[in-house]
Image (cartoon, rainbow, N blue to C red):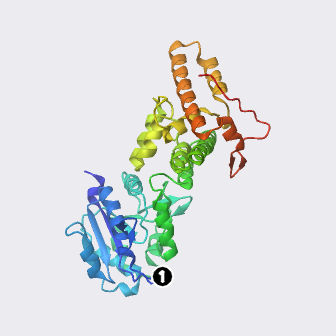
Amino acid sequence: MNRSSKTAAIILAAGFSRRMGRFKPLLNLAGMTVLDRVVSLYRNAGVTDIRVVTGFRSQAIRSALPAGTVSVVHNPDHEKGMFSSVLAGVKALAPDVRSFFVHPVDIPLVRPHTPAMLMAAFDGHPPPVVYPVFDDRRGHPPLVHGRLRAAIGTHDGSGGLRALLGRFDATALDVNVADEGILLDLDTPDDFRHLSTRLESAACLTERECRMLMEKVCGLPGPIIDHCRRVAQVGQSLARAVNAATGARTVDVSMVRSAARVHDVARLDRHHAAAGARLLEKMGFPAMAEIVAVHMDINVTASSPLDEAQIVYLADKLVAGNRVVSLAQRFAAKLEKYGHQPEIAANIDRRRRAALAIQGKVERIAGKAVDQILKTARTGEGALYAQDSEILADRRP
Protein backbone atom coordinates (compact mmCIF):
# COMPACT_ATOMS: atom_id res chain seq x y z
CA MET A 1 0.00 0.00 0.00
CA ASN A 2 1.26 3.48 -0.86
CA ARG A 3 2.00 5.30 2.40
CA SER A 4 0.16 8.38 1.09
CA SER A 5 -3.11 6.48 0.55
CA LYS A 6 -3.96 6.64 4.26
CA THR A 7 -2.51 10.10 4.82
CA ALA A 8 -4.60 13.25 4.66
CA ALA A 9 -3.75 16.94 4.56
CA ILE A 10 -5.76 19.58 6.42
CA ILE A 11 -5.10 23.04 4.99
CA LEU A 12 -6.24 25.86 7.26
CA ALA A 13 -7.58 28.78 5.21
CA ALA A 14 -10.31 30.27 7.40
CA GLY A 15 -8.63 33.41 8.76
CA PHE A 16 -9.32 37.09 8.12
CA SER A 17 -5.79 38.04 6.87
CA ARG A 18 -5.96 41.27 8.89
CA ARG A 19 -2.20 41.88 9.06
CA MET A 20 -1.80 41.33 5.32
CA GLY A 21 -4.66 43.63 4.39
CA ARG A 22 -5.57 41.30 1.52
CA PHE A 23 -7.04 37.81 1.56
CA LYS A 24 -3.97 35.57 1.80
CA PRO A 25 -5.26 32.28 0.33
CA LEU A 26 -6.06 33.92 -3.02
CA LEU A 27 -3.01 36.17 -3.33
CA ASN A 28 -1.07 35.58 -6.55
CA LEU A 29 2.41 34.46 -5.55
CA ALA A 30 4.64 34.15 -8.64
CA GLY A 31 1.85 32.97 -10.92
CA MET A 32 -0.08 30.75 -8.50
CA THR A 33 -2.42 31.53 -5.66
CA VAL A 34 -1.09 30.85 -2.19
CA LEU A 35 -3.79 28.20 -1.73
CA ASP A 36 -2.93 26.47 -5.02
CA ARG A 37 0.72 26.28 -3.97
CA VAL A 38 -0.15 24.45 -0.76
CA VAL A 39 -2.67 22.14 -2.44
CA SER A 40 -0.12 21.32 -5.18
CA LEU A 41 2.46 20.46 -2.53
CA TYR A 42 0.35 17.56 -1.32
CA ARG A 43 -0.81 16.46 -4.73
CA ASN A 44 2.83 16.19 -5.79
CA ALA A 45 3.56 14.17 -2.63
CA GLY A 46 0.84 11.69 -3.61
CA VAL A 47 -1.65 12.74 -0.94
CA THR A 48 -5.14 12.53 -2.41
CA ASP A 49 -7.23 13.25 0.69
CA ILE A 50 -6.84 17.03 0.88
CA ARG A 51 -9.26 19.06 2.99
CA VAL A 52 -9.33 22.86 2.90
CA VAL A 53 -10.94 24.42 5.98
CA THR A 54 -12.67 27.70 5.18
CA GLY A 55 -14.35 30.42 7.20
CA PHE A 56 -13.96 34.01 6.06
CA ARG A 57 -14.70 34.30 2.32
CA SER A 58 -15.57 30.62 2.12
CA GLN A 59 -17.43 30.97 -1.16
CA ALA A 60 -14.48 32.72 -2.83
CA ILE A 61 -12.24 29.79 -1.94
CA ARG A 62 -14.80 27.28 -3.20
CA SER A 63 -15.02 29.12 -6.49
CA ALA A 64 -11.23 29.27 -6.85
CA LEU A 65 -10.69 25.53 -6.38
CA PRO A 66 -11.25 23.20 -9.36
CA ALA A 67 -14.30 21.05 -8.71
CA GLY A 68 -13.61 17.66 -7.18
CA THR A 69 -9.90 18.18 -6.54
CA VAL A 70 -10.15 18.77 -2.79
CA SER A 71 -12.78 18.61 -0.06
CA VAL A 72 -13.89 21.94 1.38
CA VAL A 73 -14.81 21.96 5.08
CA HIS A 74 -16.54 25.08 6.32
CA ASN A 75 -15.79 26.17 9.88
CA PRO A 76 -18.70 28.25 11.18
CA ASP A 77 -16.69 29.03 14.32
CA HIS A 78 -13.63 30.43 12.52
CA GLU A 79 -13.84 33.69 14.52
CA LYS A 80 -12.79 31.69 17.59
CA GLY A 81 -9.31 31.17 16.19
CA MET A 82 -7.18 28.65 14.35
CA PHE A 83 -7.77 25.72 16.67
CA SER A 84 -11.46 25.78 15.78
CA SER A 85 -10.40 25.19 12.16
CA VAL A 86 -8.08 22.36 13.20
CA LEU A 87 -11.00 20.80 15.03
CA ALA A 88 -13.31 21.16 12.01
CA GLY A 89 -10.74 19.59 9.71
CA VAL A 90 -10.01 16.68 12.05
CA LYS A 91 -13.72 15.94 12.51
CA ALA A 92 -14.11 15.73 8.72
CA LEU A 93 -11.41 13.06 8.29
CA ALA A 94 -12.36 9.56 7.20
CA PRO A 95 -12.20 6.94 9.99
CA ASP A 96 -9.39 5.00 8.30
CA VAL A 97 -6.96 7.93 8.01
CA ARG A 98 -3.69 6.76 9.55
CA SER A 99 -1.99 10.15 9.73
CA PHE A 100 -2.66 13.73 8.70
CA PHE A 101 -0.74 16.92 8.01
CA VAL A 102 -1.92 20.19 9.52
CA HIS A 103 -0.82 23.05 7.26
CA PRO A 104 -1.73 26.74 7.69
CA VAL A 105 -2.24 28.21 4.22
CA ASP A 106 0.15 31.06 4.99
CA ILE A 107 3.17 28.71 4.99
CA PRO A 108 3.27 28.42 1.17
CA LEU A 109 6.92 27.68 0.37
CA VAL A 110 7.40 24.24 1.90
CA ARG A 111 9.47 22.24 -0.57
CA PRO A 112 7.99 19.08 -2.13
CA HIS A 113 10.49 16.68 -0.57
CA THR A 114 9.51 17.62 2.98
CA PRO A 115 6.11 15.85 3.16
CA ALA A 116 7.71 12.78 1.57
CA MET A 117 10.44 12.72 4.23
CA LEU A 118 7.89 13.04 7.03
CA MET A 119 5.74 10.23 5.63
CA ALA A 120 8.80 8.00 5.28
CA ALA A 121 9.79 8.74 8.88
CA PHE A 122 6.27 7.89 10.06
CA ASP A 123 6.46 4.38 8.61
CA GLY A 124 7.57 1.41 10.68
CA HIS A 125 6.93 2.42 14.28
CA PRO A 126 4.78 5.53 13.91
CA PRO A 127 5.34 8.22 16.54
CA PRO A 128 2.45 10.43 17.69
CA VAL A 129 3.83 13.42 15.77
CA VAL A 130 6.56 13.92 13.17
CA TYR A 131 7.96 17.45 12.92
CA PRO A 132 10.11 18.93 10.14
CA VAL A 133 13.15 20.67 11.63
CA PHE A 134 15.36 23.27 9.98
CA ASP A 135 18.46 24.55 11.76
CA ASP A 136 17.20 23.13 15.07
CA ARG A 137 13.78 24.81 14.76
CA ARG A 138 10.53 22.94 14.30
CA GLY A 139 8.25 24.19 11.56
CA HIS A 140 5.18 23.31 9.52
CA PRO A 141 3.57 21.01 8.68
CA PRO A 142 3.53 18.46 11.52
CA LEU A 143 2.38 14.97 10.55
CA VAL A 144 -0.01 13.77 13.25
CA HIS A 145 -0.90 10.17 14.05
CA GLY A 146 -4.57 9.38 13.49
CA ARG A 147 -4.92 8.14 17.03
CA LEU A 148 -4.60 11.72 18.31
CA ARG A 149 -7.93 12.68 16.80
CA ALA A 150 -9.70 11.90 20.06
CA ALA A 151 -7.30 14.07 22.08
CA ILE A 152 -7.75 16.94 19.62
CA GLY A 153 -11.53 16.55 19.77
CA THR A 154 -11.62 16.86 23.56
CA HIS A 155 -9.04 19.65 23.86
CA ASP A 156 -10.47 22.92 25.17
CA GLY A 157 -8.40 24.91 22.70
CA SER A 158 -6.14 26.64 25.22
CA GLY A 159 -2.68 27.08 23.73
CA GLY A 160 -3.94 25.83 20.38
CA LEU A 161 -2.73 22.73 18.58
CA ARG A 162 0.87 23.35 19.64
CA ALA A 163 0.01 22.99 23.32
CA LEU A 164 -2.00 19.84 22.66
CA LEU A 165 0.77 18.21 20.62
CA GLY A 166 3.30 19.28 23.26
CA ARG A 167 1.87 16.62 25.54
CA PHE A 168 3.44 14.02 23.25
CA ASP A 169 6.90 15.57 22.90
CA ALA A 170 8.61 12.73 24.76
CA THR A 171 7.83 10.32 21.92
CA ALA A 172 7.53 12.75 18.99
CA LEU A 173 10.04 12.51 16.14
CA ASP A 174 12.05 15.41 14.71
CA VAL A 175 13.20 15.06 11.09
CA ASN A 176 15.91 17.36 9.77
CA VAL A 177 15.04 18.80 6.36
CA ALA A 178 16.91 21.05 3.95
CA ASP A 179 13.86 23.28 3.69
CA GLU A 180 13.80 26.75 5.15
CA GLY A 181 10.26 27.13 3.81
CA ILE A 182 8.88 25.28 6.85
CA LEU A 183 9.64 28.43 8.88
CA LEU A 184 8.52 31.12 6.42
CA ASP A 185 5.04 32.46 6.99
CA LEU A 186 3.07 35.02 5.04
CA ASP A 187 1.60 37.49 7.51
CA THR A 188 2.45 40.97 6.19
CA PRO A 189 3.08 42.80 2.90
CA ASP A 190 6.81 42.66 3.70
CA ASP A 191 6.55 38.88 4.01
CA PHE A 192 4.83 38.76 0.65
CA ARG A 193 7.65 40.71 -1.00
CA HIS A 194 10.27 38.52 0.67
CA LEU A 195 8.64 35.27 -0.42
CA SER A 196 8.11 36.58 -3.96
CA THR A 197 11.81 37.38 -4.23
CA ARG A 198 12.73 34.00 -2.78
CA LEU A 199 10.69 32.21 -5.45
CA GLU A 200 12.88 33.77 -8.16
CA SER A 201 15.66 31.36 -7.17
CA ALA A 202 13.49 28.43 -6.10
CA ALA A 203 15.29 26.10 -8.53
CA CYS A 204 18.25 25.82 -6.18
CA LEU A 205 18.89 25.41 -2.48
CA THR A 206 19.76 28.47 -0.45
CA GLU A 207 23.08 28.67 1.39
CA ARG A 208 21.39 27.77 4.69
CA GLU A 209 19.59 24.87 3.04
CA CYS A 210 22.84 23.61 1.55
CA ARG A 211 24.44 23.74 4.98
CA MET A 212 21.56 21.87 6.62
CA LEU A 213 21.56 19.23 3.88
CA MET A 214 25.27 18.55 4.34
CA GLU A 215 25.46 18.86 8.14
CA LYS A 216 22.09 17.75 9.52
CA VAL A 217 20.33 15.70 6.87
CA CYS A 218 23.33 13.78 5.51
CA GLY A 219 25.66 14.15 8.50
CA LEU A 220 28.82 14.52 6.43
CA PRO A 221 32.21 14.97 8.09
CA GLY A 222 33.80 18.39 8.35
CA PRO A 223 36.52 17.97 5.68
CA ILE A 224 33.94 17.17 2.98
CA ILE A 225 31.79 20.15 4.00
CA ASP A 226 34.85 22.43 4.04
CA HIS A 227 35.89 21.23 0.58
CA CYS A 228 32.44 21.91 -0.84
CA ARG A 229 32.32 25.35 0.75
CA ARG A 230 35.65 26.25 -0.84
CA VAL A 231 34.59 24.91 -4.24
CA ALA A 232 31.45 27.04 -3.99
CA GLN A 233 33.55 30.14 -3.27
CA VAL A 234 35.81 29.44 -6.25
CA GLY A 235 32.89 28.68 -8.55
CA GLN A 236 31.05 31.81 -7.51
CA SER A 237 34.13 33.95 -8.15
CA LEU A 238 34.60 32.49 -11.62
CA ALA A 239 30.92 32.89 -12.48
CA ARG A 240 30.86 36.51 -11.32
CA ALA A 241 33.96 37.31 -13.37
CA VAL A 242 32.35 35.83 -16.49
CA ASN A 243 29.13 37.78 -15.97
CA ALA A 244 30.99 41.01 -15.22
CA ALA A 245 32.97 40.69 -18.45
CA THR A 246 29.91 40.00 -20.61
CA GLY A 247 27.62 42.45 -18.84
CA ALA A 248 24.96 39.77 -18.82
CA ARG A 249 23.79 36.76 -16.88
CA THR A 250 25.88 34.37 -18.92
CA VAL A 251 25.79 31.86 -16.08
CA ASP A 252 23.53 31.61 -13.04
CA VAL A 253 25.76 32.48 -10.08
CA SER A 254 23.25 31.17 -7.53
CA MET A 255 23.01 27.84 -9.33
CA VAL A 256 26.80 27.55 -9.50
CA ARG A 257 27.18 28.34 -5.81
CA SER A 258 24.41 25.98 -4.67
CA ALA A 259 25.44 23.03 -6.84
CA ALA A 260 29.08 23.44 -5.84
CA ARG A 261 28.11 23.72 -2.19
CA VAL A 262 26.56 20.23 -2.28
CA HIS A 263 28.45 18.57 -5.13
CA ASP A 264 29.87 15.95 -2.75
CA VAL A 265 26.61 15.41 -0.85
CA ALA A 266 26.86 11.66 -1.50
CA ARG A 267 30.65 11.53 -1.11
CA LEU A 268 30.46 8.55 1.26
CA ASP A 269 28.56 6.49 -1.34
CA ARG A 270 29.96 4.50 -4.20
CA HIS A 271 29.70 6.41 -7.51
CA HIS A 272 28.99 9.49 -5.45
CA ALA A 273 28.35 11.87 -8.37
CA ALA A 274 25.46 9.75 -9.63
CA ALA A 275 24.20 9.13 -6.10
CA GLY A 276 24.24 12.85 -5.32
CA ALA A 277 22.39 13.62 -8.54
CA ARG A 278 19.70 11.06 -7.67
CA LEU A 279 19.24 12.61 -4.24
CA LEU A 280 18.85 16.12 -5.63
CA GLU A 281 16.50 14.90 -8.35
CA LYS A 282 14.36 13.23 -5.69
CA MET A 283 14.37 16.44 -3.67
CA GLY A 284 13.03 18.36 -6.67
CA PHE A 285 16.19 20.10 -7.93
CA PRO A 286 16.77 18.70 -11.44
CA ALA A 287 19.07 21.51 -12.59
CA MET A 288 21.33 21.06 -9.58
CA ALA A 289 21.23 17.30 -10.12
CA GLU A 290 22.49 17.65 -13.70
CA ILE A 291 25.47 19.68 -12.51
CA VAL A 292 26.36 17.34 -9.65
CA ALA A 293 26.09 14.32 -11.97
CA VAL A 294 29.04 15.56 -14.09
CA HIS A 295 31.28 17.18 -11.48
CA MET A 296 33.69 14.23 -11.66
CA ASP A 297 33.65 13.66 -15.42
CA ILE A 298 32.32 16.00 -18.05
CA ASN A 299 32.15 15.94 -21.83
CA VAL A 300 33.19 19.32 -23.11
CA THR A 301 34.39 20.76 -26.40
CA ALA A 302 36.07 24.05 -27.16
CA SER A 303 32.97 25.19 -29.07
CA SER A 304 30.35 24.28 -26.48
CA PRO A 305 28.95 27.31 -24.60
CA LEU A 306 30.26 27.83 -21.09
CA ASP A 307 27.64 26.80 -18.54
CA GLU A 308 27.16 26.22 -14.81
CA ALA A 309 28.17 22.56 -14.93
CA GLN A 310 31.52 23.42 -16.54
CA ILE A 311 32.27 26.10 -13.93
CA VAL A 312 31.50 23.74 -11.05
CA TYR A 313 33.66 21.05 -12.66
CA LEU A 314 36.57 23.48 -13.00
CA ALA A 315 36.12 24.85 -9.48
CA ASP A 316 36.23 21.34 -8.05
CA LYS A 317 39.49 20.65 -9.86
CA LEU A 318 40.99 23.90 -8.52
CA VAL A 319 40.45 22.82 -4.90
CA ALA A 320 42.37 20.06 -3.14
CA GLY A 321 40.87 19.49 0.28
CA ASN A 322 40.00 23.05 1.23
CA ARG A 323 43.09 24.55 -0.41
CA VAL A 324 43.02 26.32 -3.77
CA VAL A 325 45.59 24.94 -6.21
CA SER A 326 46.37 25.20 -9.90
CA LEU A 327 45.32 22.54 -12.37
CA ALA A 328 48.99 21.65 -12.75
CA GLN A 329 49.28 21.00 -9.02
CA ARG A 330 46.01 19.13 -8.76
CA PHE A 331 46.62 16.71 -11.60
CA ALA A 332 50.33 16.22 -10.90
CA ALA A 333 49.35 14.96 -7.45
CA LYS A 334 46.78 12.61 -8.98
CA LEU A 335 49.23 11.22 -11.52
CA GLU A 336 51.89 10.75 -8.87
CA LYS A 337 49.46 8.63 -6.90
CA TYR A 338 47.83 6.66 -9.74
CA GLY A 339 50.15 7.09 -12.73
CA HIS A 340 51.35 3.49 -12.54
CA GLN A 341 47.83 2.28 -13.37
CA PRO A 342 47.33 2.95 -17.11
CA GLU A 343 43.51 2.98 -17.11
CA ILE A 344 43.26 5.34 -14.14
CA ALA A 345 46.03 7.53 -15.56
CA ALA A 346 44.10 7.84 -18.83
CA ASN A 347 40.98 8.93 -16.95
CA ILE A 348 42.98 11.51 -15.02
CA ASP A 349 44.43 12.92 -18.22
CA ARG A 350 40.97 13.12 -19.81
CA ARG A 351 39.69 15.06 -16.83
CA ARG A 352 42.73 17.33 -16.91
CA ARG A 353 42.11 18.18 -20.55
CA ALA A 354 38.46 18.95 -19.84
CA ALA A 355 39.46 21.24 -16.99
CA LEU A 356 42.02 23.02 -19.17
CA ALA A 357 39.45 23.51 -21.91
CA ILE A 358 37.00 25.07 -19.46
CA GLN A 359 39.70 27.21 -17.90
CA GLY A 360 40.52 28.51 -21.37
CA LYS A 361 36.89 29.47 -21.95
CA VAL A 362 36.66 31.31 -18.65
CA GLU A 363 39.86 33.22 -19.34
CA ARG A 364 38.85 34.19 -22.88
CA ILE A 365 35.50 35.50 -21.70
CA ALA A 366 36.72 37.18 -18.51
CA GLY A 367 39.79 38.64 -20.20
CA LYS A 368 42.07 37.60 -17.39
CA ALA A 369 43.73 34.48 -16.07
CA VAL A 370 41.91 32.27 -13.58
CA ASP A 371 44.62 32.76 -11.00
CA GLN A 372 44.18 36.53 -11.30
CA ILE A 373 40.41 36.21 -10.85
CA LEU A 374 40.83 34.11 -7.75
CA LYS A 375 43.66 36.09 -6.19
CA THR A 376 41.48 39.20 -6.13
CA ALA A 377 38.30 37.43 -5.07
CA ARG A 378 36.96 37.93 -1.58
CA THR A 379 34.39 36.01 0.42
CA GLY A 380 32.55 36.65 3.66
CA GLU A 381 35.57 35.06 5.32
CA GLY A 382 37.99 37.55 3.76
CA ALA A 383 40.37 36.89 0.90
CA LEU A 384 39.78 33.67 -0.97
CA TYR A 385 43.45 32.89 -0.48
CA ALA A 386 45.94 33.71 2.21
CA GLN A 387 48.28 36.45 1.03
CA ASP A 388 51.27 34.15 0.96
CA SER A 389 49.55 31.49 -1.15
CA GLU A 390 50.85 30.86 -4.62
CA ILE A 391 48.42 29.87 -7.36
CA LEU A 392 50.32 28.47 -10.28
CA ALA A 393 48.47 28.86 -13.57
CA ASP A 394 48.69 25.98 -16.02
CA ARG A 395 49.15 27.30 -19.55
CA ARG A 396 49.63 23.98 -21.31
CA PRO A 397 47.21 23.35 -24.20
Left or right placement of residue 165 versus residue 76 in this view:
right
Residue 247 at x, y percent in the picture: 56, 50
Query: Which residue is found at the position 56% from the left and 25% from the top?
Result: 352
Residue 249 visible in the snapshot: yes
Residue at the image point whose x is 67% and y is 40% from the top: 374
Count of numbered tags: 1
Residue 6 sits above or below residue 11 on the image: above
Q: Residue 173 at x, y = what percent?
A: 46, 58
Q: Splitting the image into 4 quarters, where does residue 386 fall?
A: top right
Q: Is residue 1 above or below residue 101?
A: above
At numbered mark 1, what does the secondary structure look like: helix, strand or loop?
loop
Q: Which corner quadrant of the image does residue 94 belong to? A: bottom left
Q: Which residue is mark 1?
A: 19
Q: Residue furthest left?
A: 68
Quarter of the image containing the C terminus?
top right
Residue nearest the observer in this picture, 41 or 121: 41
**Which residue is located at x 53 percent, y 35 percent?**
313
Where residue 90 sits in the image (x, y, percent)?
31, 73
Front residue of 59 and 351: 351
Front residue of this view, candidates 378 and 273:
378
The picture quadrant where one finds residue 83 is: bottom left
> In the rendered image, is residue 74 in sight?
no
Name the one closer to the observer, 13 or 173.
13
The residue lying furthest to the right in this view is 388
Q: Is residue 393 above or below residue 131?
A: above
What is the x, y in percent for residue 196? 46, 66
Q: Amino acid at mark 1?
A: Arg
Q: Residues within 10 Å of mark 1 (few under 14, many from 20)?
A: few
